[in-house]
Amino acid sequence: MQVLIVEPEAGGHHFVPYTLHLIRGLQARGHDVSLLTTREAQAHPAMRAMEQGCAQPFQAIIMSSIPEFTAGGVVHLLRRQLAYFLAVRRAVAALPAAVKPDLVIAMSAAAMDRIISLLGSPFARHPFVLLFVQLKFHWPSFGVGPAGRLARLSEWSLRRILRLRTLKAVATIDELVLRWFAKQPAALSKLRYVPDPGEVKATAEPGALRSQLGIAEDCVVVLVYGGITARKGLQYLLDSLSLAPDKVVVVAAGVFDQEQRGSCATQPWQALIRARRLVCIDAFISLEQESALFWAADVVWLGYEPSFAGLSAVLPQASSAAKPVLAKRDGLIGELVSRHGLGLCVDPLDTRAVAEALKKFCAQGFAAQFETALAKFAATRSFAAYQAAWIGLLEA
């Protein structure tokens, strides 16, 4: 097939791992792949990782940028969704004659789902598939978390989208969506599960990065990884360090937002940095650096703030590196960690509970008890499992 992948955004997990490993899977099956994206995404460091990670070159087709709207609430949401929808529709209408897709795959369905439900497909008559990364309207029924704003509109939009004739499938990384629609065959017939992928290859000696950062061999390194925003709950972890053993060192690595950069300049954070209890790496992390970070870590922090109840691609990454996690006990993260035995769960706001958990990880051999469970979970969230799910979806 000639497959067109639509992804105007590069950051987060948009390009790596989601789009990269979808392209790899499609190319391995002999499909021709084109990527519809923006100049901003094309200039992002993640594009270099995409180009280097694919077995064959892919054609990048540039669409117009998606404008930002500063107003809040429903108006902001709908205006941005409409702008996104129109930019995609114009780009698809103007595709070169050589690119006539047999199938379109949109990787960020939540960016325009409300408008698709009202105006129909932005892909003309081309068959298409949508990927939803974080639907929430069904969460309260499973005790995962709140349904989010406009929950009824979100469910109504998805039901309307599922009835579109050119829609071939809706992919979701949340298995609970399929359980929600289990007794509704018409909707379930187009819903497919793909695992949230994460995998870290061992490309560096575990001690190499520790030595480079000046971290002693006997220290217990807690890794906070990805886009460093308040949502990561890094402050909760730092608050617990005064009660935790002195050998606990926090390494926060990824692009810091403005708020977290401001926090990094404050006296409490600077004191931790001077005491070698905190290391901040504010940068886009390459795949080689990612490998070094995970293999140098002892524990991975997933104590996200209370308002976040979704999944984290850092969980399968930690599992693939055989690193147990210290996670929040609620939401999809807590449910997975508890069910599969991937580490310890705490209330991140409970400073003493976090410190006690850190003390346990400092004990000799404590982390070894999680190794078998981590390996089993990693196999189900590997890049190979992700690609296989996509290929199964498309061939079905």
Image (cartoon, grey):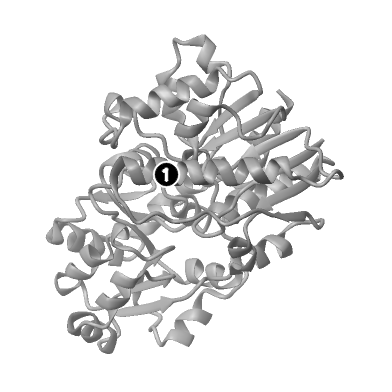
Q: Position of residue 299 (x, y in %)?
A: 37, 62
Q: Position of residue 142 (x, y in %)?
A: 30, 26
The residue located at (47%, 75%) in the rendering is 283
Residue 344 seen in render:
yes
Q: Could one spot residue 111 in this view of the protein?
A: no
- Quadrant assignment for the C terminus: top right
Q: Is residue 340 left or right of residue 6?
A: left
User: Looking at the figure, which quarter contains the N terminus?
Assistant: top right
Q: Give the residue type at disc 1.
A: Arg
- In the rendered image of this protein, does residue 300 appear above or below residue 266? above
Q: State which quadrant residue 202 falls in.
A: bottom right
Residue nearest the observer in this picture, 396 or 206: 396
Using the image as rendered, state which of residue 351 and residue 14 is in the foreground.
14
| Residue located 62% across and 68% down the image | 43
Residue 252 image position (x, y, % from top left)? 37, 71
In the figure, 225 relative to 29: above or below? below
Q: Quadrant of residue 254?
A: bottom left
Badge 1 marks a residue whose secondary structure is: helix
Residue drawn at (14%, 70%) of the image: 243
Q: Give how far across and how far down residue 46 sits, in percent.
A: 60, 64
Between 155 and 320, the one nearer to me in the picture: 155
Residue nearest the viewer, comparing 129 with 85: 85
Left or right placement of residue 168 versus residue 372 in this view = right
In the visual, does 130 lie left or right of 166? Answer: left
Residue 126 vertical position relative to residue 252 in the rendered view, above or below:
above
Q: Quadrant of residue 200?
A: bottom right
CA neighbours of label 1 inside 10 A, class few (<14), some (14 to 19), many (20+): some
Q: Quickly name the residue at label 1.
A: 79
